[in-house]
């Protein structure tokens, strides 16, 4: 059974961590100021500004920041500054028993996807493919904030996950299935294979999206997931966008989906706007979801947050 974190309300404290690549301090400070203007208090991790080559501090430092936010009673939501690379290295240094005893909203996307899935898989906590600190800028579309706050601050249920107007979801394989939704960034999910943190898709609806990869790499990753049994085990598939991806050998993201995923016969929808695209629908990882690919609908069947306010 899934654990719902306590609902987010205006005036709550948001804990900011940098779990993957470093983020320039001037960007962090501007986004924090905007987050405060939105009505939230902010606590920064000790290593939020750190840089250790391509990652923000050592694995242990980034993990300790995350654990500090889970034990800090003031913090109601934990948000990463950005994605990038390196989140996988944090996972061995987390105390999942402490996390399970202190459920909180955790939001991110891109490389943070693996953290979100592992927290759900190891503790039952519903997490969120949703906004990061870098999204708290004036250019972020209102749709992104509406989708995010609807997911983490309301109890609306059942609730459809809708693209912005004029960007339709597209059904590729007709069907109607229900299961808990998992997944996120394709690279991040593939990185987990063969590790203790490998994604479990048994009976689940699998969401995948990507950015700035050639279709040769997309083919390699999807085929890897296929051979690893992840598509065999799931009950349905949702494909997001491949933002700024590059065709290779005349094949696109859509072509690779057609070649590799349609023949599997699983209910399949594509074109969900989330994560790396301009428009970002917030997805509650671990929540019970109905995928009606006959009618192009994705419906969250339960609230993703609870009334409990520790």
Image: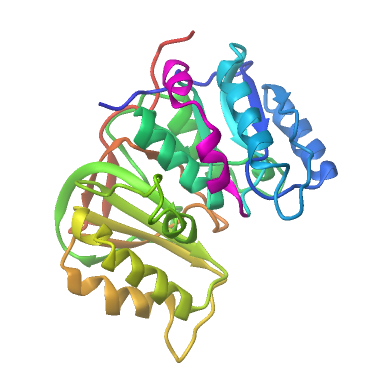
Residue at point 27% right, 68% down?
227
Q: Residue 217, percent across and down?
A: 47, 75
Residue at point 47% right, 17% down?
102
The answer to whether residue 283 shows anywhere in this view is no
Is the magenta region chiefly helix, strand or loop? Answer: helix
Q: Quadrant of residue 179?
A: top left
Name the outermost residue toward the top.
Answer: 310
Q: Residue 122, percent across and down?
A: 37, 33
Q: Quadrant of residue 31?
A: top right
Q: Residue 40, percent across and down?
A: 67, 22
Q: State the count of labels.
A: 0
In magenta segment, residue 87: yes
Image height of 264 relative to 115, above or below: below
Q: Quadrant location of the N terminus? A: top left
In the displayed structure image, the side of residue 285 where residue 232 appears, left or right: left
Seen from the viewer's position, the closer of residues 183 and 41 is 183
In magenta segment, residue 47: no
Name the outermost residue toward the right.
Answer: 26
Seen from the viewer's position, the closer of residues 187 and 97 is 97
Seen from the viewer's position, the closer of residues 196 and 237 is 196
Residue at point 45% right, 18% down?
6
Q: Residue 86, percent across and down?
A: 61, 50
In the displayed structure image, the side of residue 202 where residue 36 appears, left or right: right
In the displayed structure image, the side of residue 181 where residue 310 appears, left or right: right
Image height of 72 relative to 218, above or below: above
Query: Magenta stretch?
Result: 85-102
The answer to whether residue 32 shows anywhere in this view is yes
In the displayed structure image, the side of residue 167 where residue 77 appears, left or right: right
């Amino acid at each position: 059974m899934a654990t719902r974190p306590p609902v987010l309300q205006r005036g709550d404290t948001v804990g900011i961590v940098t779990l993957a690549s470093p983020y320039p301090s001037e960007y962090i400070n501007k986004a924090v100021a905007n987050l405060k203007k939105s009505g939230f208090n902010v606590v920064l991790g000790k290593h939020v500004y750190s840089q250790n080559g391509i990652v923000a501090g050592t694995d242990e430092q980034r993990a300790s920041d995350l654990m500090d936010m889970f034990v800090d009673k003031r913090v109601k939501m934990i948000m990463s500054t950005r994605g990038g690379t390196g989140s996988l290295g944090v996972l061995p240094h987390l105390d999942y028993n402490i996390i399970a005893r202190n459920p909180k909203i955790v939001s991110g996307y891109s490389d943070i996807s693996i953290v979100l899935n592992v927290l759900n898989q190891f503790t039952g906590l519903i997490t969120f493919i949703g906004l990061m600190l870098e999204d708290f800028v004036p250019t972020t579309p209102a749709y992104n904030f509406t989708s995010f706050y609807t997911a983490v601050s309301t109890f609306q249920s059942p609730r459809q996950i809708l693209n912005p107007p004029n960007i339709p979801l597209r059904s590729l394989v007709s069907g109607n299935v229900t299961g808990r939704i998992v997944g996120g960034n394709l690279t991040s999910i593939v990185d987990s294979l063969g590790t203790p943190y490998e994604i479990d898709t048994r009976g689940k609806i699998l969401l995948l999206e990507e950015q700035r990869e050639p279709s040769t790499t997309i083919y390699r990753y999807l085929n890897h997931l296929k051979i690893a049994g992840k598509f065999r085990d799931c009950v349905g598939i949702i494909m997001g966008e491949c933002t700024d991806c590059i065709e290779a050998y005349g094949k696109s993201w859509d072509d690779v989906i057609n070649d590799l995923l349609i023949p599997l016969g699983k209910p399949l929808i594509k074109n969900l706007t989330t994560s790396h695209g301009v428009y970002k629908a917030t997805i509650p990882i671990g929540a019970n979801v109905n995928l009606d690919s006959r009618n192009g609908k994705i419906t969250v069947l339960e609230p993703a947050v609870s009334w409990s306010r520790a």
